[in-house]
């Protein structure tokens, strides 16, 4: 699989390998992060007995398209920035 200098894949190549049904949010878009869902799929034990909201509004600050070198399975790393209550943008039209 073709890789760029930093080890990241070209987004067009990555999407071709991932398939047409896969959608990745764009940088600067707003998404909800679900801590419980993340904990259920984590490879380690995550203690959610601490008071954690069921969903957290976040801004996508970076997306890295990668592939496992052994299996060529593609995956993405998405870096999120939690937004404060004042940044929810309830007044915005979208």
Image: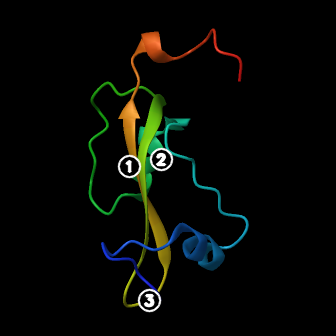
Is the residue 76 above or below the residue 79 in the image? Answer: below
| Mark 3, residue position | 71
| Mark 2, residue position | 37
Is the residue 67 above or below the residue 46 in the image? Answer: below
Say which element carries label 3: loop
The residue lying at 39 percent from left, 71 percent from top is: 8
- Name the side, left or right, on which 57 lies relative to 49: right
Confirm or deny contact between disc 1 and disc 2 (CB under 8 A). Answer: yes
- Name the side, left or right, on which 24 lies relative to 42: right
> Which of the 4 image quarters holds residue 13?
bottom right
Dot 2 or dot 3: first in sequence order is 2
Disc number for residue 39: 1
In the image, which is nearer the foreground, mark 2 or mark 3? 3
Q: Find the distance from the CA under tag 3 to the CA under tag 1.
A: 24 Å
Q: Find the distance from the CA under tag 2 to the CA under tag 3.
A: 25 Å
Is the residue 52 above or below the residue 10 in the image? Answer: above
Disc number for residue 62: none
The residue lying at 27 percent from left, 59 percent from top is: 44
């Amino acid at each position: 699989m073709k890789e760029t200098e930093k080890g990241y894949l070209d987004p067009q190549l990555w999407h071709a390998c991932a398939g047409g049904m896969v959608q990745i949010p764009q940088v600067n878009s707003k998404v909800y992060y679900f801590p419980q869902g993340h904990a259920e799929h984590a490879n380690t034990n995550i203690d959610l007995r601490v008071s954690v909201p069921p969903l957290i509004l976040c801004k996508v600050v970076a997306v890295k398209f990668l592939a496992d070198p052994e299996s060529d399975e593609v995956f993405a790393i998405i870096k999120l920035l939690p937004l404060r209550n004042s940044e929810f943008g309830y007044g915005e039209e979208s």
